[in-house]
């Protein structure tokens, strides 16, 4: 599915931007090392088109024992800024646009979690 190609490309872009954070996909089966970012997407195909509009969630997670709430907030702001200027180059998918649609934060046990929500338009890469 193109949704998986898209979030793999997003992970690549975020990994390059944040080499000190563990960047995971929604379906990764591995231990989460904090701080971390988890990227997930559900997409809707546009009728008779290879284009997709997707609901993208980028969860920023921090360990409360290893960082302060202010460090978590700085991570969230940095990841949000990176997502708002996201460009996918030399990938198997094209990103046609992305907008922030909201966020929600929680504190679970000893972790801070902030879900950044976006709407994205993407589709298969085309040769020019």
Image (tube, grey):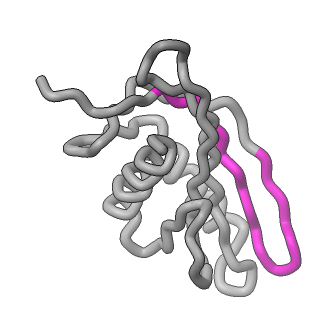
Q: Between residues 40 and 107, which one lies in front from this camera angle?
A: 40
Q: Is residue 69 left or right of residue 126?
A: right
Residue beneath the point at 64% across and 46% down: 57
Q: Please report the bounds of the magenta region as a residue range.
A: 104-121
Q: Between residues 54 and 106, which one lies in front from this camera angle?
A: 54
Residue 20: x %, y % from top left: 42, 75
| Residue extending furthest toward the left | 128
For residue 72, above or below residue 47: below
Residue 118: x %, y % from top left: 61, 35
For residue 84, above or below residue 90: above
Is residue 81 among the parts visible in the rendering? no
* Magenta run includes residue 120: yes
Residue beneath the point at 70% across and 51% down: 115
* Magenta run includes residue 30: no
| Residue extending furthest toward the top | 48
Q: In terms of secondary structure, what is the magenta stretch mainly? A: strand
């Amino acid at each position: 599915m193109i949704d998986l190609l898209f979030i793999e490309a997003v992970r690549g872009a975020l990994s390059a931007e944040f080499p000190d954070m563990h960047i995971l996909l929604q379906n990764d089966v591995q231990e989460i090392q904090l701080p971390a970012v988890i990227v997930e997407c559900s997409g809707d195909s546009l009728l008779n088109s290879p284009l997709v509009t997707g609901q993208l969630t980028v969860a920023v997670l921090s360990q409360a024992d290893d960082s302060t709430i202010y460090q978590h907030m700085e991570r969230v702001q940095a990841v949000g800024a990176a997502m708002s200027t996201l460009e996918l180059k030399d990938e198997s998918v094209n990103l046609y646009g992305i907008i922030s649609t909201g966020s929600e934060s929680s504190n679970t046990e000893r972790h801070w979690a902030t879900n950044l929500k976006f709407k994205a338009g993407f589709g298969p890469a085309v040769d020019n």
